[in-house]
Amino acid sequence: MIDKQLKETLLLYQVEKPGSEQIEKAKQIVLKNERPIKAPYISAKRVVSSQIQTVSNWFWLFSLMFVFAVVYLSFKINNQLTTLFLCGATPLLSIASVPVVLSNIDASRMELEGTCLIKPQTVFSAKMLICGCFDLIVIIITLLFSSQLSEINIVRSAVLGLISFTASSFLCLGASLIFKTQVAISLVSALYAVVVACFVSMNFLSEKLLEIKMPFLVLAVVINSAMVYAMYSVAIKNYSFEKVAKRFGNKIF
Amino acid sequence: MEIKYSEITKKYGDKKAVDGVNLTLNNGVCALLGANGSGKTTLMRITAGILDATEGSVSLDGRNIKALDSSYRNILGYLPQNFGCYKDFKAKDFLMYMCALKGIDGDFAKKRCKEMLEEVGLTEVQNKKIGSFSGGMKQRLGIAQSLLNEPSVLILDEPTAGLDPKERIRFRNMLCALSKERIIIYATHIVSDITFLADRVLIMKDGKIVADGSPEELIEIAVGKVWSVNVERSELSRIQARYSVGTIKDGDNGFVNVRIVSEGKPFEEAVNVKPELDDVYLYFFGEVSEDAEAD
């Protein structure tokens, strides 16, 4: 189409017919000048896949170990304890995500990635999405295996696991906005895991937990998820090169 | 293409890193010359859209770069002064990753990565982890990533830092070939880098553009202000405190030949010499102690 238009336009000026090389050159100039208004569309799938390769192998390995550990313990302990154990162990998944997510909060890397077509905020969201979704998949797989090995109430276990996971995710995200080091952020979630473990180990409390009616548990999941989303929004709002550089003191200024 | 800066100011607290810059840049290499802390990097970052200006705006062909958003980033190539990357990545993987972020598709991405690795001489180490790279190799990789999307606006902040002389020449030649059809903004404090490369030189001091012109035009500023004189070696420290001193060459019998940049004739026996771009830099940035000035 462009070739035809160019040829017709040039004929109007009664100039010598341009060769294919000249046409190609003119076409490239036109296309180049057109580029500012033609940023290509990048699908969410491509953004996510670009980020998967940046996730450390340790994260995948830890998640795999988590599945094996919980499933193995399903053999050893009774049904109720499997559910409660899952509650206590899910914060570990959030802790494992901390270094993965924090690896993106680096001013020197953001400076480079921030000039690319995909916005740094989108990259950061994709990284959190990968960790969050993968952890959820791990929890579901663990539950499915555990339910085969012991007669746990899979729905109740899933909901309790989700409550614990969303709570620890909220804590990790919140801590990442306050503290600067991976250790400090992980400690907050680890502290939460210890509290949950203590809670679970006290029989009368854990029995009460298992007696809570389902609608209340679902409501807790919804509230927790909303809190995680709110914290995610704050994290994204604060995710700019200038703010990160100032906060983490990358000697940028 | 044209990049226009309108009253660009960037403040960090009370300090103005960039102070009311008004400027228009067209295709070709524009070198931004200035001492450390003169505001070059901040201006580069504002141009790259990484930092927001406190006041003023940057526009590309009349359209604000903030409004152009992804369309601007699509035609932008940027090499920061110090850039971070995933150290576990291999060189090839890093470029492929940058291609993904720049929206470059599979086969074309592979082709561009191969071309750029060849261009910067990293083909042989493409499967090595970046963590094992020397400073110069990392810098070359940075240059390669900045060119992946064939940018129409190329911003390079101290690109030759860490490069050996051979690589520097290779890089200069590469930029020369690229400069015809794009805007290249090149921040440096190494004068020799830009002498043969820049179509236009901007000198930045305390956040302001204090000089603007072709290298030849800027050299004109220093005409009649560059002096050569033989002095006793023992006098050297006193002269250095009093004047902006350039090259010092060893002479015979305890004498040294000193190149001085000064408005007036520093010594009776001083001879006026032809200035170079280094002298212009010294003219603007040469440190003279306040006590000596008071003398």
Image: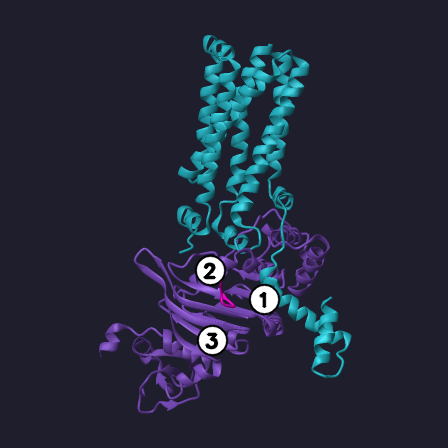
Report the residue marked by disc 3: B201
Q: Quadrant of the C terminus of chain B?
A: bottom left
Mark 2: few/some/many CA within 10 Å (<14, 14-19, 20+): some
Q: Which chain is cyan?
A: A
B142 on left or right of B225: right
| Circle 3 SS class | strand
Q: Nearer the viewer, residue B208 or A163?
A: A163
The alpha-carbon separation of the residues under discs 2 and 1 comes to 17 Å
Specify whether residue B112 is painted magenta: no
The alpha-carbon separation of the residues under discs 3 and 1 comes to 19 Å
Q: Quadrant of the N terminus of chain B?
A: bottom right
| Circle 1 SS class | loop
Report the residue marked by disc 2: B45
Nearest to N terminus: mark 3 or mark 2: 2
x then y, percent, for residue B165: 57, 70
Specify whether residue B61 is painted magenta: yes
Mark 1: few/some/many CA within 10 Å (<14, 14-19, 20+): many
Report the residue marked by disc 1: B152
The quadrant where residue A253 appears: bottom left
Foreground tag (3 vs 1): 1
Nearest to N terminus: mark 3 or mark 1: 1
Q: Are marks 3 and 1 in contact (CB under 8 Å)?
A: no
Q: Amino acid at mark 2?
A: Arg
